[in-house]
Image (cartoon, rainbow, N blue to C red):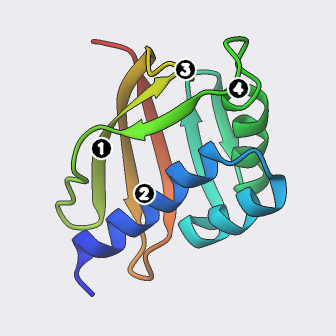
Amino acid sequence: MTEDTLHTRAVDAFIAATETPDPDQRTTLLSRALAADVVFWGPLGRAVGRQAVADFITEVVQGHPSGPCRMVRTTRVDAPGEWARFGWCYEDADGRVLLSGTDVVHVTPAGDIDEIVVFAGPL
């Protein structure tokens, strides 16, 4: 399996986890995508561990005041070596974009994301 394939699988599992309202399914998807001690740098600060990422998804992504929303990968996963970046948008049920940005992730040789840095909004 190539690095690009490992990176894309991890990123897509992470995005799928943001979309599911089922906490058990979210946990399963995050275990496929993230290292247990993942470091997550987001707009609200720094968190460590899969559970912290799951809590962020539950509170911020799933709990958005606009109702059910979804995260969509808007670019290919660009993966030079162990790092990758991808564009995303967050849209409401009508497909209206509420926020967009770029994430940068570090991927281990096993294909687990062990660091996520979220850049939300335009520069």
Q: Which of marks 3 and 2 is nearer the N terminus?
A: 2
Identify the secondary structure beneath mark 4. helix
Q: Would residue 56 be found to the left or right of residue 84 on screen?
A: right
- Where residue 66 appears, as percent x and y from the top left, is 67, 12
**Which label was assigned to residue 86?**
1
**Which label was assigned to residue 19?**
none
The residue that disc 4 covers is 60
Nearer to us of marks 1 and 3 is 3
Query: In this picture, is 83 found above or below 59?
Result: below
Q: Residue at x 45, y 65 (%)?
A: 10
The residue that disc 3 covers is 92
Quadrant (top left, top right, bottom left, bottom right) of the C terminus = top left
Identify the secondary structure beneath mark 2. helix
**Gap in angstroms between the C-alphas marked 2 and 1:** 8 Å
- The amino acid type of the residue labelled 2 equals Val
Q: Residues within 10 Å of mark 1 (few under 14, many from 20)?
A: some
Q: Earlier in the sequence, mark 4 or mark 3?
A: 4
Contact between marks 2 and 1 (CB within 8 A): the answer is yes
- The amino acid type of the residue labelled 4 equals Val
Query: In this picture, is 49 found above or below 90?
Result: below
The residue that disc 2 covers is 11
**Gap in angstroms between the C-alphas marked 4 and 2:** 19 Å
Identify the secondary structure beneath mark 1. strand
**Gap in angstroms between the C-alphas marked 3 and 2:** 21 Å
Q: Residues within 10 Å of mark 4 (few under 14, many from 20)?
A: few
